[in-house]
């Protein structure tokens, strides 16, 4: 039974603007679904509808929990401020933990674990207003992670993070999904992030899920380039030879036209079967 | 929602903020005291011709009136301006219940701020008079104005530009609080249906004063109902996270 099942969801804003136009989506426990799509495609509206900040006009949201109730959600929304600037990181976390109804007797332990995890342990007693933008992002993430949620809804979670933090964060998401069996639904524009963490990627356009059309991802770019790292078996090299270039030391470049679905099929197979890692993705004219 | 834990967290948040910005707290306290004493003297001369009780209560009343009426909308306005409103909606199972608790904390905070004035008032007017005034006027006034304030808070979720209107309405409710309705005929009972009016009267136990509590609860229920309706409308229009 999926953790989340969305059926024919419609969200409409005054205008009227159809942010979601009959969207269908499922998400299972232990799955990371990355949502891609242009600005205004409806990605954030879907997250807001799922966490109750926006009421859908039509459609259904079904939760695969024993009582059918919304599971514990951890939400990180891009653009909103998740904490009070005149409180320290720790005070903020403790305040929101109380609002979320977390038990007080184990709170210190839980907070310490999270502060260490997001790398803010040494800065926990500093005012949140004095944090750098990367640290603010981490504190927002920490607040989303409070109370071990069953489903994480993340809106552009790596925006503003440096590369080292992104790598750590990717590892963390993969670990909690494996260890805790939670589900993650995440919006992103960073393809390398999506390729690294996603069990599945979906593409939103005008409030609907579209088929995996790479050309729309790259807009006007004619070709897509993927830098890959890892061991490439000889048969894979032979099979995908027209698209592959070896840089040495386990680095590979996969390149092809954005309207050539074979390139992306090759990529998906390589990632799924050969345990390769995507280091970088970009479009070229 | 674990009421006790949230109440503790709210008290801690207010206390930490007041302590961290202690200089601002101190200056606020001084300004508060000076303005209150000034208001007492001015009201006494201008309107009450030396009737100490009414003038004193009017001076003590204004911070309580403003805080009770404005707490719900002020708290939401702050969270909207800070950008934390979405996080509040995501974390608290019921924002309405959170506002109830914040109102309670604000009541205690306002009493703490007015404590010097209350102590002076109690000393000059008598502790019994002060206690009776709190029981017959202040508590129902607080509850009823908080209820009306919830409507304003709900409106603020839908119409963000109402922010400045709250100040204007605050002045109006302040004026109403010191208006003395006639204590004759049907007004003896009818005035209790408006606990936010004529709350400066300090003398005696007014006949049917308990009706003020009933009326106050009705205002609270109507306010809560309106807030939920407007909150649902804000969610339908996708306005919760708009700044």
Image: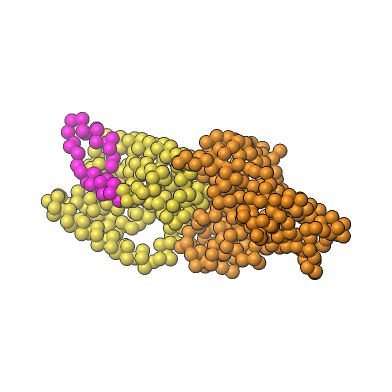
As drawn, is A255 to the left or to the right of A50? right
As drawn, is A262 to the left or to the right of A19? right
Residue A115, image x, y percentages: 61, 62
On the question of residue A89 being in view, the answer is yes
Q: Which one is in front, B44 or A28?
A: A28
Q: Is A125 located above or below residue B101 in the figure? A: below
As drawn, is A119 to the left or to the right of B56? right
- At horizontal 48% and vertical 64% (from top left) the residue drawn is A129
Residue numbers of the magenta segment: B167-196
| Chain that is orange in the image | A
Q: Which one is in front, A70 or A80?
A: A80
Furthest-top residue in this view: B186
- At horizontal 65% and vertical 43% (from top left) the residue drawn is A210
Q: Which one is in front, A121 or B123?
A: A121
Q: Which quadrant is the N terminus of chain A positioned in?
A: top right
- At horizontal 70% and vertical 44% (from top left) the residue drawn is A28
Looking at the image, how many numbered discs can be counted on the residues?
0
On the question of residue A144 being in view, the answer is no
- At horizontal 18% and vertical 30% (from top left) the residue drawn is B185
Residue B36, image x, y percentages: 24, 58
Q: Which one is in front, A52 or B206?
A: A52
Residue B184 among those drawn in magenta: yes
Main SS, magenta region, reads helix
| Chain that is yellow in the image | B
């Amino acid at each position: 039974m999926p953790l989340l099942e969305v059926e024919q969801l419609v969200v409409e804003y005054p205008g009227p603007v159809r942010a979601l136009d009959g969207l269908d989506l499922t998400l299972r426990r232990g799955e990371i679904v990355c949502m891609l799509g242009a600005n205004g495609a409806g990605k954030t509206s879907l997250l807001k509808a799922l966490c109750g900040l926006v009421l859908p006009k039509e459609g259904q949201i079904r939760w695969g929990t024993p009582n059918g109730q919304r599971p514990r959600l951890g939400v990180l929304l891009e653009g909103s401020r998740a904490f009070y600037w005149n409180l320290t990181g720790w005070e903020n976390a403790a305040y929101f933990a109380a609002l979320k109804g977390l038990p007080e007797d184990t709170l210190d332990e839980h907070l310490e674990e999270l502060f260490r995890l997001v790398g803010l342990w040494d800065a926990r007693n500093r005012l949140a207003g004095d944090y750098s933008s990367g640290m603010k992002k981490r504190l927002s993430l920490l607040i989303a992670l409070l109370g071990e949620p069953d489903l994480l809804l993340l809106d552009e979670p790596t925006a503003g993070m440096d590369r080292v933090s992104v790598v750590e964060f990717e590892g963390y998401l993969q670990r909690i999904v494996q260890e805790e069996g939670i589900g993650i639904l995440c919006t992103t524009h960073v393809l390398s992030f999506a390729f690294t963490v996603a069990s599945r990627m979906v593409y939103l356009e005008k409030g609907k899920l579209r088929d995996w059309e790479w050309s729309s991802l790259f807009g006007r770019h004619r070709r897509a380039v993927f830098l890959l790292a890892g061991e490439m078996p000889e048969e894979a090299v032979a099979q995908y030879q027209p698209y592959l270039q070896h840089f040495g030391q386990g680095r590979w470049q996969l390149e092809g036209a954005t309207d050539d679905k074979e390139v992306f099929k090759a990529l998906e197979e390589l990632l799924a079967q050969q345990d390769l890692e995507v280091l970088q993705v970009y479009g070229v004219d | 929602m674990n009421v006790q834990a949230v109440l503790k967290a709210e008290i801690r948040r207010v206390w930490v903020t007041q302590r961290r910005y202690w200089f601002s707290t101190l200056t606020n306290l001084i300004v508060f005291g000076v303005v209150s004493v000034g208001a007492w003297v001015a009201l006494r001369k201008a309107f009450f011709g030396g009737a100490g009780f009414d003038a004193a209560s009017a001076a003590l009343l204004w911070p309580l009136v403003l805080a009770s009426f404005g707490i719900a909308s002020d708290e939401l306005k702050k969270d909207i301006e800070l950008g934390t409103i979405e996080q509040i909606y995501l974390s608290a199972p019921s924002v309405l219940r959170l506002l109830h608790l914040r109102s309670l904390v604000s009541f205690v905070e306002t009493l703490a701020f007015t404590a010097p004035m209350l102590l002076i008032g109690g000393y000059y007017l008598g502790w019994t008079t002060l206690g009776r005034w709190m029981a017959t006027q202040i508590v129902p006034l607080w509850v009823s104005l908080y209820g009306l304030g919830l409507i304003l808070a709900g409106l603020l979720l839908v119409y963000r530009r109402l922010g400045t209107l709250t100040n204007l309405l605050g002045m109006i409710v302040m004026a109403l609080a010191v208006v003395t309705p006639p204590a004759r005929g049907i007004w003896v009972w009818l005035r209790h249906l408006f606990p936010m009016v004529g709350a400066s009267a300090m003398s005696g136990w007014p006949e049917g004063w308990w009706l003020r509590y009933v009326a106050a609860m009705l205002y609270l229920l109507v306010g809560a109902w309106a807030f939920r309706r407007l909150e649902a409308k804000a969610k339908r229009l996708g306005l919760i996270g708009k700044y």
